Every structure is written in structure tokens, then in C-alpha cells.
């Protein structure tokens, strides 16, 4: 009950302007009123998981579940575990998101089931557990791990409206999932263990530097991208190269390039961007690639 109260309080704090709650005001009809009795104030005896974090996790699960249901309305008739089993798992990103959905499922059930609980242990780890359909569900992780679960879903859903290719999204989600698993200390559900993936390469999910139209040389069956002076240090300078070629746009991360910027023509094709008008980026990207036109002879001010 305390956990649900925290969630409701967090909801009102975030969406208070949408909550038209009744107003309660005291009236005193007598000069000598008979006073009411009140319980002693509650004293917190243990650390509590922030209510806004639990609300964010349950909302994230619902948001992802609704998106899947939009793609396949038949999922609405299934329970949460059967829904996980029926999720699409054709591409790498779909497989990763299925496991993220599965992890969020434990947190959501622990938050809403009568026998569920989400608690902070003495060692600072967060444990979510409950019994559901005669199966013990448990997740022991860190606060960072829970925040990464929310972040990965937001990225995935936003990626549906971005120009990045499936290969790019898979690399980003792969790094999210690797970091999420790194925060998990124990996991248990209907299938006991999470599915493990072999990470294709390390990918900087924290920050990306975008380079528009670098020089590209076509040499037989491969391309050579001019990485400039920053491309040889991808850990410090995680570059994304936006390349216009043959009326198409390609977004190639520096992490997949070999020495001196080489990439095979076969591998290059998978980085083709999703655009509606050939090589044109969405208008929202205009501010991200601001350029001032250079005029010869015009003095700098």
C-alpha cells in the first residue's frame, strides 16, 4: 500500500495540472468543538525506492506494451508472459527489446500485485519480487539499472521516427542492454534466466559527434571514409558520419570502421538511412547541422 501511495504522489507531482481534485476546507460550527483523534505520524524505518522511479518504470512498460499492441492487436488478448513469447524477434533490435520488456514485466508486477514488493536492501541494491501465476519473479539490480531500462525503451520508441538504420539502432540498444545486464545481480522469472547476446562492438551511447559529408573514396569493393584527425580515437570522439552517396543518405558510426576509415561495400549498405525524400534529412535536423556560408573577401566581424 505504501508503494502505491508513493506512485500516486509522484503522479500528482508530475501531472498535477491535469488532476482536478476536490478541495477540503475545515468549518467550525461550535465555539467549543469536539476535537478528532489522529494517529501518530509514520516514521520511515527503511529506505524507500523513489515513487517517481516506480511510476516511470510501470509507465514505460505500459508504453512499450501499447506500442506492441498497436503493431499486433492480437497481443491484447494475451497475458504478460504469453505476450513476451509472442513478441516479434526477427531483427537484432527486436530480440533485445523483447528481453527489456521481459525485465520490465517483473518490476511492473512487483509494483501492482498485492504480494509484490520493491525494496532497497541494506547494500543499496533494489529488489523487485512477487509471486504471479504460481511463479516466483525476482529482480535484483541497481537504481542505475532501472533508469537504463526506462532510457532504452524511450530510445527505441523514438528511433521509429528517426533516420537511423536498423544496424545503428541495434548497436545502440546492444550497448544499453549490455549496461543493463551489468547492473543486474540476480534475475528470475518463468524462464529463469535472461537471454544473452554477443555484443557486436562497443558503442558509445552517451554522446555522438555528427560529421556531415566527409570525403569518401570508392576503391573496388570497399569505401574509404576520411575520418579526419578525430576518427582515430573513437572512445574519445564517437563520430557519426552522414554521407550522401547516389541520392541516398548513410549514417555510419566510427566504431564499425577499420583502420584508416575502410569499410566494405557490403557492410556500407546496411547503414542506409530511413528518409522520406531521398538523401534529405527531416527538417528537425537542420539546427544540428548549422553552417555559415563562406563568402570570399568578406571580413570577419
Image (spheres, rainbow, N blue to C red):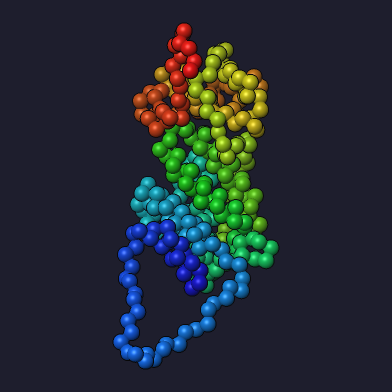
Residue at figure coordinates x 46%, y 62% from the top left: 10
Task: Estimate the x, y position of residue 164 in percent, counting from the top left.
Answer: 47, 33
Q: How many marks?
A: 0
Kindly indicate the quadrant of the structure image that contains residue 239: top right
Task: Estimate the x, y position of residue 157 in percent, counting from the top left.
Answer: 44, 44
Q: Is residue 112 left or right of residue 180?
A: left
Residue 91 vertical position relative to residue 134 in the rendered view, above or below: above
Residue at figure coordinates x 65%, y 66% from the top left: 121
Task: Estimate the x, y position of residue 204 in percent, counting from the top left.
Answer: 60, 37
Residue at figure coordinates x 32%, y 64% from the top left: 20
- Asked if residue 83 shows in the view, the reply is no
Residue 185 vertical position relative to residue 1 in the rendered view, above or below: above
In this view, the residue farthest toward the top is 297
In this view, the residue farthest toward the right is 123
Residue 248 vertical position relative to residue 165 in the rendered view, above or below: above
Residue at figure coordinates x 37%, y 30% from the top left: 283
Q: Nearer the viewer, residue 207 or 254?
A: 207
Amino acid at each position: 500500500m505504501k508503494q502505491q501511495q508513493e506512485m500516486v504522489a509522484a503522479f500528482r507531482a508530475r501531472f498535477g495540472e491535469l488532476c482536478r481534485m476536490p478541495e477540503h476546507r475545515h468549518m467550525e460550527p461550535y465555539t467549543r468543538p469536539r476535537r478528532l483523534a489522529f494517529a501518530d505520524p509514520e516514521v520511515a524505518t527503511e529506505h524507500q525506492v523513489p515513487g517517481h522511479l516506480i511510476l516511470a518504470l510501470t509507465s514505460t512498460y505500459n508504453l512499450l506494451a501499447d506500442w506492441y499492441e498497436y503493431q499486433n492487436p492480437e497481443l491484447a488478448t494475451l497475458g504478460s508472459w504469453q505476450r513476451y513469447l509472442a513478441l516479434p524477434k526477427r531483427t537484432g533490435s527486436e530480440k533485445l527489446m523483447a528481453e527489456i520488456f521481459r525485465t520490465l514485466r517483473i518490476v511492473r508486477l512487483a509494483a501492482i500485485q498485492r504480494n509484490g514488493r520493491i525494496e532497497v536492501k541494506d547494500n543499496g541494491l533494489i529488489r523487485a519480487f512477487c509471486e504471479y501465476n504460481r511463479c516466483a519473479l525476482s529482480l535484483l539490480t541497481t537504481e542505475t539499472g532501472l533508469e537504463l531500462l526506462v532510457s532504452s525503451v524511450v530510445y527505441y520508441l523514438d528511433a521509429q521516427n528517426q533516420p537511423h538504420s536498423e544496424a545503428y539502432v541495434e548497436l545502440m540498444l546492444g550497448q544499453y542492454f549490455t549496461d543493463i545486464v551489468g547492473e543486474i545481480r540476480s534475475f528470475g522469472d518463468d524462464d529463469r534466466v535472461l537471454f544473452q547476446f554477443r555484443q557486436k562492438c562497443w558503442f558509445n551511447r552517451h554522446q555522438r559527434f555528427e560529421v556531415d559529408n566527409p570525403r569518401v573514396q570508392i576503391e573496388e569493393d570497399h569505401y574509404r571514409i576520411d575520418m579526419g584527425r578525430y576518427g582515430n580515437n573513437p572512445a574519445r570522439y564517437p563520430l557519426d558520419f552522414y554521407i550522401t552517396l547516389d541520392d541516398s543518405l548513410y549514417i555510419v558510426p566510427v566504431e564499425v570502421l577499420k583502420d584508416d576509415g575502410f569499410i566494405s561495400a557490403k557492410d556500407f549498405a546496411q547503414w542506409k538511412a530511413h528518409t522520406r525524400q531521398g538523401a534529405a534529412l527531416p527538417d528537425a535536423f537542420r539546427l544540428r547541422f548549422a553552417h555559415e556560408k563562406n563568402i570570399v573577401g568578406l571580413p570577419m566581424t
